[in-house]
Amino acid sequence: MRHTKNQRKRKWFILFGNPAIYFLMGTTNAGTKEPLALLKEALQGGITHFQLREKGHGALTGEALVEFAANCQKLCSEYGVPMFINDDVELACAIEADGIHIGQDDMGCGEVRKRIGASMALGVSVHSVKEANEALACGATYLGMGPVFGTRTKSDAKPPAGVAEIIKVKTQYPNVPVIGIGGIEPGNAEMVWRAGVSGIAVISSIAQAEDVAGQIERFKQSIPGRRVG
Ligand code: 3NM
């Protein structure tokens, strides 16, 4: 199901209203699983946001990528989960994704905002208050910050940054949604929540879990105040 601009605007308003378990995945993260089957397990398990991040050796391109993205979108819409596209403005526009996420090395965020228009959500990876200022000035909807912990998933990730910068950005911009990323697991997620994030973004700890739904439940239990027992 595609959303009209007004529906998208409405969804934006509540885009990070509740603690977000934001799953990122591409076909190269699925291991021995069929990628769409993995995404379906994650949706059934209760992820709240999905980002298609198709990177690395053997990544899909061209028509195959568009087809895969459209299949992911169909699945996400069945579960009412907003879908973001990593980096690829053309793909995000072609499938009318709910949002796009870009890094500091990608096309400038002002340019991206111009190309996607006003109604698509824009996430920008930042590492400091200065980068947050710039991203917000050019229309970022939310900020991604990491890597909080060491990660083996992103080969060019910066050194682990902990939560100090997240706290600084949240102090400056209490109402801006910040999503923590990088090496987050159920056992270390609590300190990220306590830094004031609206959500945690995860690849390997969900993609590689034997029991995907169980792992997502463990992430939900890591939200302070939500712990059971
Ligand atoms: N971005 P995992 S770290 C995609 O620091 C990504 O901006 C990062 O994967 C950043 O959950 C990262 O397996 C990889 O550590 C996250």
Image (spheres, rainbow, N blue to C red):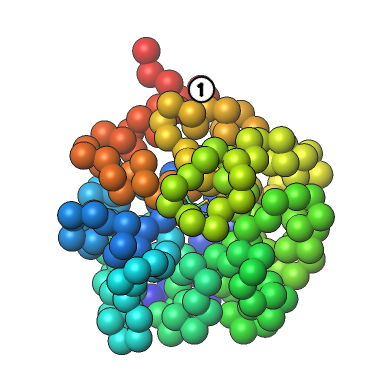
Give the image location of residue 156, x and y in percent: 54, 58
Where is residue 64, by image quadrant?
bottom left
Dot 1 amino acid type: Gly
- Which of the image's four quarters has the C terminus? top left
Q: Is residue 196 visible?
A: no
The structure residue drawn at horizontal position 52% and vertical position 27%, both measured from the top left corner, is: 190
- Say above or below: 206 vs 49: above
Give the image location of residue 34, x and y in percent: 18, 60
The structure residue drawn at horizontal position 42% and vertical position 35%, both measured from the top left corner, is: 185
Q: Is residue 58 visible?
A: yes
Give the image location of residue 90, x and y in percent: 49, 84
The structure residue drawn at horizontal position 68% and vertical position 72%, both measured from the top left corner, is: 109
Q: Is residue 106 left or right of residue 130?
A: left
**Residue that badge 1 annotates:** 225
- Say above or below: 70 vs 36: below
The structure residue drawn at horizontal position 43% and vertical position 52%, both measured from the top left corner, is: 153
Query: Foreground: 175 or 214?
Result: 214
Picture mark count = 1
Give the image location of residue 159, x and y in percent: 61, 45
- Say above or below: 173 vs 52: above
Q: Is residue 109 left or right of residue 65?
A: right
- Which of the image's four quarters has the N terminus? bottom left
